[in-house]
Each structure stands twice: as C-alpha cells, then as structure tokens.
Image (cartoon, rainbow, N blue to C red):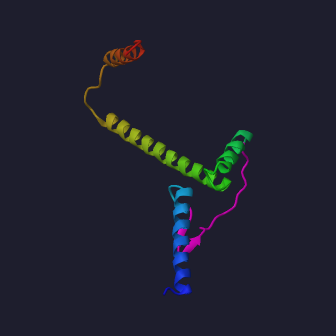
Amino acid sequence: MISSRSLRNKELETEIFWVALFESITYGRNNSYRLEGLISMPKVEKISIALPAEMVAAVREAVATGEYSSSSEVVRDALRDWTQKRTLRRQGLDELRQVWRQAMENAGPGVPVKEVMNRLERKYRDFSKPGE
C-alpha cells in the first residue's frame, strides 16, 4: 500500500517537473528561472523605462496573448536579442578590420579600378534583368 506521504512526494515531484517544463518553454532561450529543488528567481534590479505608445501596445499584446508571462519577460527577451545582434555586429567589424589590415600589409599588386568597376557593372546589370 502507498502511504499518503509517498503519494504527496510523488505529487510534488510531478508538480515540480511540470512547473520546470512550463518555465523552460515560457521563459525562452536562457531560462530566466532555475530549478534548484524549487523554482527560484535570480537577483533582479527594477528600473523604469519610457516607451512610445506603439511599443507599449506591442508589449501588452504579447502578454495578453500568452506569448509572454509578463512585460518584464518581453523586455528581457528583446534585450537578449539586442545583445546577440550587438555582439555579431562587433564581430563583423573586427573581421572587417582584420581583412583591411591584411590588405594594407599585402605588398602585391592590387586589382585595377577599371576591372573592379566592370565586375560591379556586370553584377548589378544581371540583378536588374527582368525574369531571371
């Protein structure tokens, strides 16, 4: 026979499992909340921001439709995306700088301007042809 205590423990384990699953689905890529025996919220700092009416409406709609559980989650997700985009942009600039330095250090003959212009004209002429 199963005791009421072991039944309650099993119910609690099941509840924690479903809450953890819901949290990982709801709170996205970085799982803002962690399961450590129980669900605990990381240390957060409250700030106040001003947004145009259209952005406020978009945030509220995302929460109202259930896409996010709170306005804070919408903002956190947007900041994660912005941070990733910013990192990629910086990496792209670093790569461009490296290519530029290599080109400047290369003492070999460059490509004549006329040849570059002819290549660009052909490329963009091909883009402008209708039906292709």
- Left-right relation of 67 to 128: right
Identify the image quadrant of the C terminus: top left
Foreground residue among 111 and 79? 79
The residue sitting at 73% across, 55% down in the picture is 48
Position of residue 108 measured from the top left corner of the image (x, y, whole percent): 25, 30
Main SS of the magenta segment? loop
Q: Residue at x 29, y 25 (%)?
A: 110
Q: Give the number of callouts.
A: 0
Residue furthest left as drawn? 108
The image position of residue 21, as x and y in percent, is 51, 63
**Depicted 68 relative to depicted 128: above or below:** below
Q: Give x and y (percent) for residue 79.
A: 58, 51
Quick check: can you spot residue 44? yes
Observer-nearest residue: 46 or 40? 40
Relative side of 40 to 93, left or right? right
Q: Between residues 17 and 99, which one lies in front from this camera angle?
A: 17
Q: Position of residue 91 (x, y in %)?
A: 43, 45
Q: Residue furthest front?
A: 1
Magenta part of the protein: which range? 32-51
Q: Nearer the viewer, residue 42 or 60?
A: 60
Residue at 66% over, 55% down: 70
Q: Is residue 9 above or below residue 61?
A: below
**Is residue 10 depicted above or below 1 in this figure?**
above
Q: Is residue 25 magenta?
A: no
As displayed, is residue 88 above or below residue 24?
above
- Determine if residue 31 is in view: no
Q: Was residue 39 drawn as part of the magenta stretch in this picture?
A: yes
